[in-house]
Image (cartoon, grey):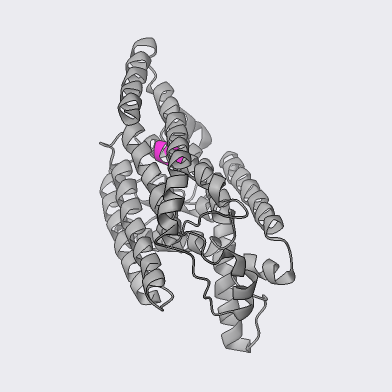
Amino acid sequence: MILWLLQHFGYLLEQLSSRTTGDSRVFLTARIAAASLTAFLVTLLWGPVAIGWLKKRFRERIASNSETLNKLHANKQETPTMGGLFVMSAVLISTVLWGDLDTRFVQVGILVVVLMTIIGAWDDWVKQRTSRLGLSVRQKFAAQLVVGCIAGFALFGELRQQPFGTELVWPIGNVSVALGGFFIAWSALVVVATANGVNLTDGLDGLAAGCTITTASAFAALAYLCGHSVISEYLGIPHIQNSGELAVMLGALVGAMLGFLWFNCYPAQLFMGDAGSLPIGGLLAVCALATRQEILLVLIGGVFVFETLSVIVQVACFRITGKRPLRCSPLHNHFVFKGDHEMKIVVRFWICSVLLAILGIASLKLR
């Protein structure tokens, strides 16, 4: 009944918009807001049911390679996990209701979300049902690379018809690099890197969800701006026809993350697991690739980048020098080991994420 009302409400909005104004952007803005609100309400309403269902089947098993970290996170033991299943379902439901499913960018976004959710759920299931800590590194990366290549191939066919094509656009200055067929391999790299960046960040209550909200909000704005011919020309950014439809999907992601944060804030009642973190990263990567703003993703998603780099630096330094620059990686665990309260760490990371998003949007005028 609720879905029927939402569908007909969307149809009514479309009819009113077409009759009262000739500017389709008005309706797009309304659909972005509606998608966000719908995903939030679906997540909020499903939350208690999902928690009860997951509590009987999938509970967090704290079993890292660090005994100290296991002790520090012992209170998280038995918390329901794999919450990403119902969160990403809310994103897809909202996208189907409010998005233009005939748009290639939306189709690719949906495909990546579904495939990455399957990979993440598979990894979570292995953790839950076996003594292993999930899929092997090779298995996870291989599966993610396949998804990234599929996304790259699908986007390549759409973007090569656009003015900027598959050029890699630098955030500052009128500089771009033609990628040609290498765009597919580049897409796979961006998808895998972003997905794992979000996955590494998902270690404290509310941390990944909060950072996702700011990053997805910034890229929803970018997708909208890139899809607007007048504004994109004024800002000196690539005009990508139909990229504004991705703003609807990212709006749904923001709403779903707000609903999830309702249950995931400290102390968390539910964790998203890889079933949530991997598709989130995949969707952010698709938006960055579609809008030709992959370089800006490094800045706006800076928290995810630093979390990833902290692991790489930690491993590299230990292998080369036998010493670890951080007490524990990823970066947020370093502060946990220092004795900082979990909420203090999370809120400070949120602040950094907001500042980076603001800086990323502000950089548009430097062009």
Residue lying furthest right in this view?
A: 339
Q: In the visual, does 50 lie left or right of 315?
A: left
154 sits left or right of 54 in the view: left
Q: Position of residue 185 (x, y in %)?
A: 34, 63
Q: Residue furthest top?
A: 20
Q: At which x and y percent is residue 100?
A: 31, 33
Q: Who is closer to the viewer here, 319 or 34?
A: 34
Residue at figure coordinates x 40%, y 58% from the top left:
275
Quadrant, the C terminus:
top right
Q: Eyeballing the image, is 236 above or below 205?
A: above
Q: Position of residue 153 (x, y in %)?
A: 27, 55
Residue 156, horizontal then vertical, whole percent: 29, 51
The answer to whether 72 appears left or right of 104 in the picture is right
Q: In the rendered structure, does residue 314 fall within the stretch colored magenta?
A: no
Magenta segment boundaries in residue numbering: 247-251
Q: Is residue 147 visible?
A: yes
Q: Main secondary structure of the magenta part?
A: helix
Q: Quadrant of residue 56?
A: bottom left
* Placement of the N terminus among the 4 image quadrants: top left
Looking at the picture, tell me which residue is in the foreground, 11 or 73: 73
Q: Residue at x 68, y 67 (%)?
A: 336
Q: Quadrant of residue 245?
A: top left
Q: Is 112 in front, or is 337?
A: 337
Q: Is residue 168 visible?
A: no
